[in-house]
Amino acid sequence: MDRSRTRHFFGISWVVLFTLGLVAPGFSRGAARLLDDEDEKKEEEKQDEKEGEEDDAYFAVVGGDVITGTGAVLRGATVLSKNGVIEAIGSNVFLPEGTETLDAGGMSVYPGLVALNASSRISGGLLAAEAPIVAGRDILDHLNESIGRALGGESHVDTPDNRRGDEIGDWEDLQGEQEAGAKGSKHNDSFDPFSPYMTMALAAGITTADQSGAAVKLKRGEIGDVVMNERNLVSFSWSTENPSGIRSLREKFRTTQDYLDKYRAWEERGNKDEKEPPKKGVDRSALRVLQNRSLARFRANDREDLLGIARFAQEFGFRPVIDGCREGWTVADELGRAGAYAIIIARDRRPKDESLVRPGGSKIENAAILHRHGVQIAVKAFTTSIESMGITGRDILHLPVEAAFAVRGGLSNEAALAAITTVPARILGVSQRVGTLVEGKDCDLIVTDGDILHYQTFVQYAVVSGKLVYDKEKELYFAHIRPRPEGIEDELEVEAVEDDGEEEPPEGDGEDDGEGDDEGDGEGDGEGDGEGDDEDGDHQDDDS
Amino acid sequence: MTMIPKAIGLLALTVLPSHAAPRGEGGSDLLAIRVGKAETISQGTLEHVVILVEGGKIVTIGEDLLIERGIPILERPDWTAMPGLVSCHTRIGLEKSTSRSFEPNTNPKREVYPRQKVWKELLELGVTTLGLVPEGNSGVPGQAIAIRPYGDTIDEMLLEEDVYLKMNLQSSSSSKAIIRDAFGKVDTYNKKVAKEREKWEKAREKSKKKSSRSRSKKSKDDDEKEGDDKEKEKAKSTEEVPKEFVPPAPDAKVQPFIDLREGRLTAMLSIRKAGDYLHLLDVMEEEEDVKWFLRVPLRTDIDLYEVADRLGEREVLAVLNTRITLQAHSRRERNIPAELARTGVHLALTPESDRMSSYEEWMNDVGHLVSRGLEREKALAAVTQEPARALGLDEQLGTLDAGKDANIVFWDGDPLEPASRVQAVMLEGRFVTGEVD
């Protein structure tokens, strides 16, 4: 994209640097950026194609405190979206004629949350089967473990991933499959833009949901182009209780690695007469991982498994995504060295196996310790389901609260926010589009009436691809709980609902701010700081 | 009032052939019916109405018409007349059969058994036209037929075959692919035809050339052998190259989709929720020439109101069952038929289910929708004119108008009032139920 032109066009605008790896220290930063950059190139090509198709649609969120997710907090700033992509962020942004504006005065603006392992009903609607395969296994996993606990022993769900041979047929085939991409995705075809579950997910601040490995954008009222990436995760299983599975996995990777080495050497030699190296035994999934086109996901919780995965990943030079990672804190340094991603449930509680001398079991500091050692932390909810309507407080509607529990365990606020935005975006391979609020990324954001990690905070608005898709006052779910202060509401009624063409400067900004604070949630409103959370965290932690 | 002389004129002149009357008797069967009210659908509610029926058709209808002497008169000033009810999507009277997933070239004609009690019962409720559909809630189960619930054989009952093609469309790759593939096969067939035509044209040109060349040769040289050759050639060419191009016959399952594209057949697209409609547009946007209407079975928590405006914009004909629904995740009532009608959707209502009890409750349910905000005129049209349109029979029935089939239901009050009862039913000029002396 031609950024220089836009900059000159908008006068003084905040140039937010592309500093994605900020939250991840050391080694992981470089690697993460490499990945993101590569993806960005592809994205740029896509966007160039899009341009010029229709009239430009401008949408601006004005006057909120913008927490960009890159470390910068811009007070009273404006986020301007052009055709769903962030055009400018700053305090002095010129709004073109016909810009639809949303006043966020006195509120906070965050990047939309990215939910891992979300129920397929979010994008599939009421009639969809409840759980995606992966998540179903997840619940099974938990069930199994609790049964195991009750019986006083260990129990494991053996995932069949390793056994499924997935040999590639053709190199061209492989490239073609890559090209086919997300457009023909089944998730695009089964997308229900009126799903009430989607509304609820948006109410929880989620704008991107992982639907069995596909990153799906929660656009409302329209279909098409909702899948951003659906091939970024490849699952493998690793369990010390199944040594033959590990052996076969290792064999698979070795063969594939050998093939890759030979192929590269063959390519370098450039000898036309020489035959291509044989693809026998090459595994498609392993190939994707070794070519850095996919991330390998392992479901593991036990120390021995985690160690094994960390070493295996280092041996073959890829970054593992470890789902679960309960005892990760005991081997955090190894995981950090392997550049692992960890998807954790911050409220996971499980006592240590007393028959073992080594440290074990769950620990509230898990996330903090892992993060300190360079592991990128993503937080997921205990259940993928949304059916319980938030009653249990442990479903996907409580993703930010789940992240707040990691803060209670010592994780920084920034890292906790990253754990539900940038890191899951990276895991799903969509960090070039969502996860932070940066010029050039998708305008997927949420406007909240306080710190997103505070249990009292409500999402007031959600915006996806530069369109307002959720307004708390207009949906039946939470409108009645702590209604939006009247002064603000009235103004928003005017502003938010289709005001094509007219440009009203937001009036009485200062006043509304005051009002918002008075009638709103008391201290900590819009400040985005940790003090309040930790206190409030206490309440909830008592029962867990 | 201006109608009076006209009516008299008509009465004097009309000797209509009584072709379509199930009665089938010779001679004049003119009958005048004087009722208190008539819901004509096309011209609203009329009072003090005279309906003149002959040969199974309505000859004329109007307020306070003079009736020529000698014409038998049925005086029922307490009655309200309305067109016979049309249920355009049902399987009542049909046995449960195996669900069909892709049988676009079939229809349920062979599943219909005449002489069942159910047909008589339907007539008694005022249902005079039925659109029977094949079983199947996915894919393309087949075509619908239109019948009158009267007659001793299926051919007597049958009004029209292949009135619309039922297609189920859901938001899923496989469901969308079924319909895309079906139209894709038409493209393949068209290509094949084009190829054949090219071949034929070439062959024809060739044979023309040859014959002309040999003719010229013959004039020059009278060699017998050549003459023989020529004759042979001629015989060969007439054998191989027909004068008219005959396109290869398409597959039976492709034919319906060709008919759709060429406007000979209408499609009924059945969807389950609002989101499906967007996917439907996604599929059908490539098929601009195909005429289609919509069917949405209303479930309690359906979210169809989400696309009410979009449906209204296109003035879609939507077939719904008669039901008040709830907004998802709440107890808020939504009168979806009323909401759709307000946006400009053409509404056709069917009974809640295919059971007899639903047919008994049908007009009650419609009345319920009206009491909850559905416009009265639209409600009445939704059980007569609009479903007739869905069946492609709107030229023939569905309103009380001169020239239409005399399918008339006589009520002892407002048809939408729960206390009202059907007093008599006329099917194509003949009273099939009710005490009329």
Image (cartoon, coloured by chain):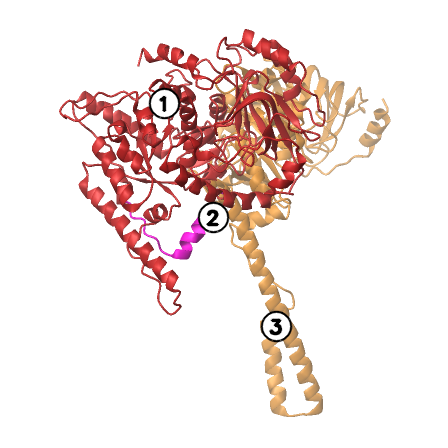
Chain colours: A red, B orange
Task: Tell me, for residue A168, which label it has, or none.
Answer: none
- Mark closer to the observer (1, 3): 1
Letter of the chain that mark 1 sits on in the rendering: A
Circles 3 and 2 on the same chain: no
Label 1 SS? loop
Rounded to the nearest whole Å, what is the CA distance between mark 3 and mark 2? 43 Å
Give how far across and how far down residue A55 sits, in percent. Answer: 67, 38
Label 2 SS? helix
Q: At label 2, which amino acid type do we have?
A: Ala
Determine which residue is flagged by label 1.
Answer: A411
A155 sits left or right of B432 in the view: left
Crowd rating for badge 3 (residues with CA inside 10 Å; few <14, some 14–19, many 20+): some
Q: At label 3, which amino acid type do we have?
A: Ala
Letter of the chain that mark 2 sits on in the rendering: A
Task: Tell me, for residue A180, which label it has, or none.
Answer: 2
Q: At label 1, which amino acid type do we have?
A: Leu
- Mark closer to the observer (3, 2): 2
Determine which residue is flagged by label 3.
Answer: B203
- Magenta region: which residues? A164-183
Give how far across and how far down residue A400 sits, in percent. Answer: 42, 21
